[in-house]
Image (spheres, coloured by chain):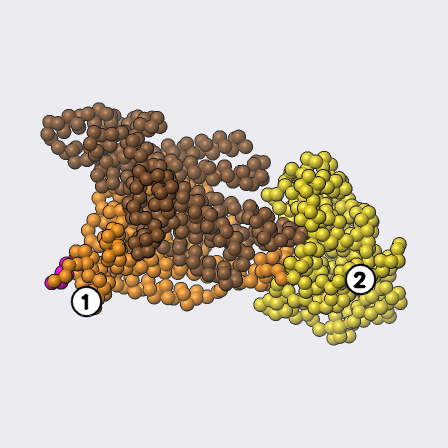
Chain colours: A brown, B orange, C yellow
Amino acid sequence: MRKYWLQRLGAAIGLLLAVSALTFGAMNLLGDPLFNILGPTAASTTPEDLEIIAAAEAEYNLDDPLPVRYVKWASAFITGDFGVQFSSDGQPPVSDLIKERLPRTLMLLIMAQTMAITVAVPWALLAASKADKAVDKISTITAFLFIAVPNVGLAVILKYLFALKFSIFPLIYNASDPFWSRVWQMMLPAISLALPAAAIYQRLLRTDLITTLQEDYILTARSKGVSKRNVLFKHALRPSLFSFITIVGITTGALLGGSLIVEQVFIIPGLGSAIVEAILREDFPVVLAIVMIVTAAFVVINIFVDLIYSLIDPRVRAE
Amino acid sequence: MSTTTDGIVETSGVDDETIKANAEGAAEKRTLGIGFWIAVIWLGIVFFAAAFAPWLPFKDPDANYIQRGERPPYPPSMTHPFGTDQDARDILARTAFGGRVSLTVGLVAIAMGMFFGGLMGILAGYFRGWWDRIFSFIFIILLSFPSLVLAILITSLLERSLRTISLTLGILTIAPVGRVARATTISFTEREFVLAARTLGAKNGRIIIRELLPNVVIPMSALALLGMGVAVVAEAGLAFLGLSVEKGPTWGKVILTGAGSRDLQKYPWIAIIPIVVLFFTVLALNFAGDRIRSYFDAKETAL
Amino acid sequence: MSKTAETPLLELDDLKTHFRTERGLVRAVDGVTISLKRGESLGVVGESGSGKTVLSRSIMGLLPSSSVNHGSVKFAGREILGLSAKQMRHLWGAEMSMVFQNPLNSLNPLMKIGKQITEPLQLHLGMSKATANETAVQLLRDVRIPEAEQRLNQYPHELSGGMRQRVMIAIALACGPTLLFADEPTTALDVTVQAQILDLIGEQRRERNMSVILVTHDLGVVAGHTDQIAVMYGGKLVEYAPTKTLFANMLMPYTKSLMRSIPKLVDPSHSRLATIPGRPPDLVNPPPGCNFAPRCLYAQPKCHVEEPPLVEANDPSHKYACWYPVGTPEFEKRDAELQATGYRADDVMAVS
């Protein structure tokens, strides 16, 4: 068991290194690194700007070869030093921006995943227990529709319907409001992320449930007199969760991407909008930092999924 | 009485399958179905409109059709079936021309993904060993990035042309397609007919082309349609963030124009019409891909 | 033996179970009449496809809704055929229970053994968790599983095949049912373990005065462990008699073939394994006449045309369905022919 986890950890670290190297390399090779850091200032020739350029060159060790720069950047990154925001006045550290924006995106994602799972599991149980009857067929069509809807479309339409036409939800997210107001303001954005995810989860879980219900031990359970409801919940659900958990982990990545769009539609000052603004302002330390954080989080989440596997399936634990 | 979800293990030896199939309540339909053809028709219309847009009687997508006495945007009417945006540009035209970009990006992305991803996947699945290790590693790295994040990373570094956007989305498609190609290849190489071909002395290349490829191509084609839907949506997302092609309209850009709170409330058609077009197109692609997959799956299980 | 409990525990009257499928109506069980007293054990023997498993599930009522049932099934005097699952649930696990064939697949891999045993105890007998656990430990001891307390917290994959089957038996016995079905309980096990399991079932039967229906393809299994035997073929009951009577006086050629196909230790090594040639009949379109006729070494012209009814032998408790059973002149003549060729089935088939 221990060996398995050590291997897993090693693989994850290796992956993170590869990903960060790739990102860093891309940013420094696909364009003039100086330009990537300083933006238009890099081309300037005024004395002040030349000073800034010299400072940047020293700070970022632009004379050193790429691998060295990578190591220096990576070691700083791990300690939480993400560099500075060149495009903002006073050049505050990037970590400030992250600290400010991250909680909002986190709230959005947690709400979205929670909603998606809470909706998907009962939905899947219902569909599986009434497989191929009318309820199931309708739910299959509905799920299909929600999977096909693009995030941008769903967010805009939800905003139109429930915030504008029928003012059920507020329109604006206000970061200084108390916690529960903010949760309410985040509802519509979270719903627009949650619905397609819930549909994907439901479809998968339903299929797995139906497969599990064909297993021999389900017949044994029935022959003991266990009610249909308990057969579903106590005997069939747990063995059906494996693919479900995997897909929840993987969908987190899609949700991360979706949050970029949803934050734009609902004007939420989170990590997603931060990176978009940074791109448009050509503030690359910010872009680099956020991409790395988000990707690292994704890798960690998938390791977490593995961990949950072993908690659910005693057979894996035994290995 | 009991529902169709009860399973029987062994009833009568001869008719196990038919009993089970009936007990499960639904044998997969062996036809593509009318829904499939409706989807194909819609896709045909959209593709036709996009491909021949410059020669069809659409208005100029960039021109401003300001009417005297009234300020834009104008709601849908006889002259502007989809209405206009705030700069009085005709939305029907912008949707049609926008389709050119969106669909081209989708096609190129999926073609790239299928070609490179398929190639890598088949090689990895057939030869295993180092091929497998290297390509699977590449797949894993690519899949470690949340897809939209990877897309904006690359597009932020390069110029925003049709070529680079298509390239970026193509790179995104490689890993998912490659993984499916690899898995399918592996499952086929383990089957008898490849073994038979090998024992007959067929060379690897011949086996790959004559035996494997036809079988791997089928699930990949279903995936291609689905993947194209994903690529089109991704482009719309990028455009919405202001990160897509610089010149000309795309579906995402048109949606962006109308998505501001005030605009959305007063002039909903600007955003909602392209959203509807986008939705139906993706729906049609998904549905068609799904029908193809279950059609060929059903045939396979009949083996 | 008390005369008061004369009402048989289980009475089947012309039970038929058919399945609606795309190909047509599958007559899996086609007219079975049986009677079983409390404490008695019945062996149901047949090849795969004979309908023996469908029979046991049909009696219990565990079949999917695509099945159509006719006839009557009386349990303790009460008609249970056609009851809904909801009504049957009160009987399942409490009055009648089943031990299934493959214990690895029939136990929930993600649920602790203890939980799987205490579940019916808490459900039907309303026991508290503590009492249920104690009872479960006792049950495990009853089925001769060592270190019973530890087992409660273990998972199925941690036990050997034989132990898993014992656990299944413990689960089936938990609420003290009056009728136990054992569906091929030993097929998935080693030969050495088989005997132990069968002995265990017999022991429990006597202690609890429980009826047992043992379903198997192996005549050897039922020989020492049953009071009655019902031989099935193609969904029909072809021979039905008390065990001793059957083995002393087999009437139906099919039963005789089954008997002969059991390899015996006393056979010289490298002797040919006698098998019954051919395949089970198509249950949608059975052949005319006797179901077994196409494969029967003793078949006469009449057998291919008219279906033999189930009739009584000289001993009224012995029923069989055959036109030319053992003892008839036609049978003896044919038997002599076969003896001459050393019972080589394939040779005979070539000649006819």
The residue shown at (40%, 54%) is A147
Residue A137 lies, in percent from the top left, at 48, 61
The disc placed on residue C271 is: none
Asked if C233 appears above or below A58 in the picture, the reply is below
The residue shown at (78%, 48%) is C201
Relative placement, left or right, of B101 versus B6 is left
* Residue, disc 2: C35
Q: Secondary structure at mark 2?
A: strand
The residue shown at (20%, 49%) is B246
Residue B66 lies in the magenta-colored region: yes
Q: Residue B68: tell me if it is visible.
A: yes
| Disc 2 from disc 1: Cα separation | 86 Å
Q: Main secondary structure of the magenta part?
A: loop
Residue C33 lies, in percent from the top left, at 77, 65
Q: How many marks?
A: 2
- The kind of residue on which mark 2 rests is Ser
* Residue, disc 1: B79
- How packed mark 2 is, by other alpha carbons closer than 10 Å (few <14, some 14-19, many 20 or more), is some
Give the residues in magenta. Answer: B62-68
Looking at the picture, tell me which residue is in the foreground, A178 or B119: A178
Residue C344 quadrant: bottom right
Relative placement, left or right, of B218 versus B97 is right
- Foreground label between 2 and 1: 1
Residue B287 lies in the magenta-colored region: no
Looking at the picture, tell me which residue is in the foreground, C173 or C67: C173
